[in-house]
Amino acid sequence: MKKTILSLLTFIIVSLLGSCAYADSNIPKREFRGAWLHLIGQSQWAKKTPAQQREYIRSEFDKLQEAGINAVVFQVRPAADAAYISKLEPWSKFLTGKLGKAPDPIWDPLQFAIEEAHKRGMELHAWLNPYRVTTAPGEVLPADHIANKHPERFFKYDGKILFDPAYQENRDYICEVVSDILTRYDVDAIHIDDYFYPYPKKGQSIPDDKSYAKFGKGMDRGDWRRQNVNLLIEQMYKTIKETKPWVRFGISPFGIWRNKKNDPRGSESNGLQNYDSLYADILLWMKNGWVDYVSPQLYWELDLAVAPSRKLAKWWSDNSYGTDIYIGQDLRRTMGTPDTKAGKPNELYTKIKLSRELPNTKGAIWFHGYWLTENYKGAHTQMANEHYPTLALPPVYGDKNVVPDQVKNIRIGKDKQGKVLLEWDAPAKNGKVEKETDPVKYVVYEFLQGEKQDLNNPETIISITSDTAVVLPGVPEGNTYAVTAVDRMNRESKPIFLYGKK
């Protein structure tokens, strides 16, 4: 439901006091507000029973929704493993405590997370790491693990096992994992993070001499490595679109493509470079249309000399080739760094303001979601009351001229407990085949008597839900309601109104 009356009053009071400089019109109706929830390195998951894990997901999703988040980026494949039922890869040790050990009793975290996100009108983006196999030296893999079946297709770096990006068989396998998820789960996006070729370690070189001799064909080694990653990205994109065209493909790369001192197209920065160190040419992927959104990890302070996120945010917007940019933000640094230029105790205000002002930037993803739900340095409170006080739909994808059918038969009813409901009927589905225009959620608007019936005003949204009913606080007198259907591409139907009695 929409923020409570109390929280709205809090927002108004805070605004009047000057803590939040946004006018209501500057808080958009459409904005990507994501949060990463990772399994890797999170020991609390394996310490919980399946029932406790389910309750943990519910609780985390509730808190994220209260903070205004509308998309959860949930890690389901940290390292050639699975936080879901899979015939291809073993159960994740980060979920159960031991690689290959199934939950007892068995359950499916990905399916549960999808259902819980969709109940709340939120998106669920399945987060995979493409190349990582082990996370620590000496880790033992099951005998039937693909890295044991085909050791020639893998290499060790920094004591850890990784897929060798040079092998087409590896690209096919990774895409098979993606296809398996897509065919069995109703995810809204496939999301991969910043690990391509491994982050460099001093004194170590990538041991790919054999595969280079086999496949390199005299190419420059760096160009060859980049081409290997390009081939995976292109194939992943095609796999997604051929399986479910409405599912988005998102990538969250390291925050610097190249530094300007090395390439005139680069950014005013002096840090590690995707292009040269990780062999990830993100600009090419955006230019070729192989990715739907990019969330560069601008985890640094606004004016950090080596990597100023203020300048980098503008650089990514200016070099997006029309791809949606959702800035990846580090919540801990953001809340722990005073913004002296803006006269603010932290950088949250300016970073959100930047994401709303830059032309190709349509939101942010926060790392990590646990800091947000824990209200680190008041982050949850500040987001809920100042920056995300109204509900928001994610950006539209696809042909904007195509919209889902309208809902039907809007009415007032009551549930078994006597609570007053606003109800409606979903648009009729044509057959059982899933389509991008299928309605997957609904937006409910409430207009007070005499209030302008403006569906672009996010303050009038009282619910974004996958249900076909919402509970009202009482029998409406004079208020007007409107309901729209939203399809898999986040396109909104024409509204149907229920006019209140004057």
Image: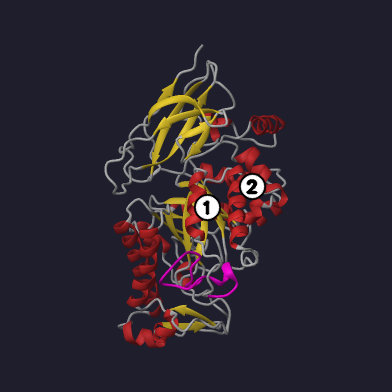
Total marks shown come to 2
Asked if labels 1 and 2 touch by Cβ distance under 8 angstroms, the answer is no
Cα separation, mark 2 vs mark 1, equals 19 Å
Within 10 Å of disc 2 (Cα), the crowding (few <14, some 14-19, many 20+) is many
In x, y percent, where is residue 327?
52, 52
Q: Quadrant of the N terminus?
A: top right
Q: Is residue 208 visible?
A: no
In the figure, 475 relative to 65: above or below? above
The circle drawn on residue 348 is 2
2 or 1: tag closer to the N-terminus? 1
Q: Residue at the location (58% across, 49% down)?
A: 61
Asked if residue 445 lies in the magenta stretch, the reply is: no
- Observer-nearest residue: 240 or 293? 240
Is 85 covered by the magenta stretch? yes
Q: Secondary structure at mark 1?
A: strand
The residues colored magenta run: 79-99
- The residue sitting at 51% across, 54% down in the picture is 113
**Label 1, residues with CA under 10 Å away: few <14, some 14-19, many ≥20:** many
Tell me the chief SS of the magenta region. Answer: loop
Residue 132: % across, % down: 49, 74
Residue 90, how many percent across, how many down?
48, 73
Question: Residue at label 1?
Answer: 72
Which of the labelled discs sits on residue 381, or is there none? none
Residue 479 in the image: x percent, y percent? 52, 19
Q: Visible in this render: residue 102?
A: yes
